[in-house]
Image: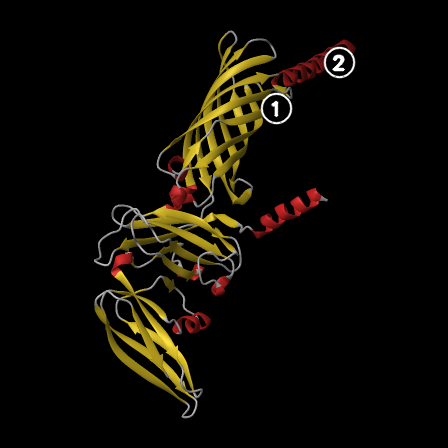
């Protein structure tokens, strides 16, 4: 009887140990950091596409937690848009387009060091309208980001990637019904090229 | 000390600038036509914002700035979209400068208020522009012969080219404009001069009507009262 109790205790303790070791394996707080350049291409008939010229932007992204092949990260993206159609925007030179977003990535190993990483994200948009030495005001909004990255690991800690994203932006707007969608919605296709440290 | 002065001026300029609500956009639309009703293309108009409310008479007031500009298309159609000024009281004016290329005289529609916009949009009636050579001057010289009378109102009825139009006339501005003594008239027309004189002896308002005609030469008219 004494032996049986000991055996049961041993099995239980072994089972807890296994569960704990599995959890450690599944959830990770190891961080990685990505930095990339983004090249936006506006699509459709909206103000960002017709009244501005977009420039190359920058994006920085930090992973917070990973679970199996999933990882959750937070990012910041910045790009500047030059006003080209003053009669639609006003006598303003440019707009700083910035986004803070959360994103979920899923890692799929394609071949050895090559990974395909589809992702989905949601962000808060803040557009700052400016001319040199002058702030005019801010327009806020949200965006949904869908995309994928092709990531190549050079070493265990350094990799490079190319990304493709399609982004739907909704901006706060009060205007004539005819122009609500024109100034309030935007779609863009975005190509990015960057590096990753982990 | 020098740096302090520079900083002071930098902050002074910042404090003068008008903030805007970029989440609210106003639209002004109109059509430009000549004296024969034909569309005018390639004429530039701008929107001037002033924080000085109704006292702002003319384009160029120091408490304001140009917030939008546009050029009319081949159909004379002009559209300007601009952010709403984010201040309590403001007025707008729609302006064109004397254009030496197209030859049209300047136009200024001023005292445009937020309440003039319906669903954020203001559609103005056709704006008629005149060329220099279509216009001649009608100047009135005032000749007061008695202290018992006061000139209250002057009005010209005919084909008048009004360079400054008040979209929301109020009392102060009306008084200012009623005593206008300089008019731009289209050449070769008959017109009527109406003026009111208040007689302090009889305490009555006397209305006077004079029928006149103008050719291509300017007229200097002496108004005696």
Q: Nearer the viewer, mark 1 or mark 2?
A: 1
Secondary element at image label 1: strand
| Mark 1 Cα-neighbour bin, 10 Å: few <14, some 14–19, many ≥20 | some
Q: Could one spot residue B83 in this view of the protein?
A: no
Query: Disc number at residue A65?
Result: 1
Identify whether B10 is placed above or below B109. Answer: above
Task: Report how far apart the C-alphas of labels 1 and 2 lie in the structure.
Answer: 40 Å
> Residue at the location (41% across, 61% down)?
B110
The location of residue B76, given as percent across then percent down, is 27, 50
Q: Quadrant of the C terminus of chain A?
A: top right
The location of residue A159, given as percent across then percent down, is 55, 13
The location of residue B40, given as percent across then percent down, is 26, 51
Identify whether B128 is placed above or below A21. Answer: below
Name, please, the residue furthest toward the right: A2
Query: Depth check: A97 or A145 in front?
Result: A97
> Residue at the location (54% across, 26% down)?
A59
Mark 1 and mark 2 in contact? Answer it, CB < 8 Å.
no
Q: Is residue A63 left or right of residue A178?
A: right
Chain on which label 2 sits:
A
Query: Depth check: A105 or B57 in front?
Result: B57
Secondary element at image label 2: helix
Answer with mark 1 or mark 2, whichever residue precedes in sequence. Answer: 2
Query: Disc number at residue B22?
Result: none
Query: Disc number at residue A5?
Result: 2
Query: Depth check: A93 or B199 in front?
Result: B199
């Amino acid at each position: 009887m004494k032996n049986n109790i000991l055996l049961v205790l041993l099995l239980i303790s072994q089972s807890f140990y296994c569960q704990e070791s599995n959890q450690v394996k599944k959830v990770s707080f190891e961080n990685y950091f990505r930095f990339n350049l983004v090249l936006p291409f506006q699509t459709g008939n909206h103000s960002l596409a017709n009244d501005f010229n977009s420039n190359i932007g920058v994006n920085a992204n930090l992973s917070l937690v990973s679970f199996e092949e999933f990882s959750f990260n937070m990012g910041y993206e910045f790009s500047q848009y030059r006003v080209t159609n003053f009669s639609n925007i006003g006598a303003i030179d440019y707009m700083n387009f910035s986004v803070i977003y959360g994103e979920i990535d899923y890692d799929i190993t394609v071949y050895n060091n090559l990974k395909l990483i589809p992702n989905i994200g949601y962000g808060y948009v803040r557009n700052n309208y400016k001319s040199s030495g002058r702030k005019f005001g801010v327009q806020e909004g949200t965006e949904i980001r869908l995309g994928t990255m092709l990531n190549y690991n050079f070493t265990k800690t350094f990799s490079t990637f190319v990304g493709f994203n399609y982004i739907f932006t909704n901006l706060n707007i009060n205007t004539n019904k005819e122009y609500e969608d024109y100034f309030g919605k935007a779609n863009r296709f975005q190509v990015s090229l960057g590096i990753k440290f982990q | 000390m020098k740096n302090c002065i520079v900083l002071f001026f930098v902050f002074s300029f910042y404090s003068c600038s008008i903030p805007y609500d970029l989440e609210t956009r106003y639209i002004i639309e109109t059509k430009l036509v000549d004296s024969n009703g034909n569309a005018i293309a390639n004429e530039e108009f701008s929107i001037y914002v002033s924080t000085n409310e109704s006292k702002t008479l003319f384009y160029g007031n120091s408490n304001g700035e140009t917030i939008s500009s546009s050029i009319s298309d081949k159909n004379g159609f002009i559209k300007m979209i601009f952010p709403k000024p984010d201040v309590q009281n403001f007025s707008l004016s729609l302006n064109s400068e004397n254009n030496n290329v197209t030859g049209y005289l300047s136009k200024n529609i001023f005292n445009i208020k937020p309440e003039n916009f319906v669903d954020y949009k203001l559609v103005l009636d056709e704006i008629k522009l005149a060329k220099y050579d279509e216009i001649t001057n009608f100047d009135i010289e005032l000749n007061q012969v008695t202290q018992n009378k006061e000139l209250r109102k002057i009005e010209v009825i005919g084909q008048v080219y009004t360079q400054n139009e008040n979209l929301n006339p109020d009392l102060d501005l009306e008084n200012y404009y009623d005593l206008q003594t300089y008019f731009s008239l289209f050449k070769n027309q008959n017109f009527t001069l109406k003026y009111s004189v208040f007689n302090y002896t009889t305490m009555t308002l006397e209305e006077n009507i004079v029928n006149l005609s103008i050719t291509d030469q300017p007229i200097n008219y002496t108004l005696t009262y």
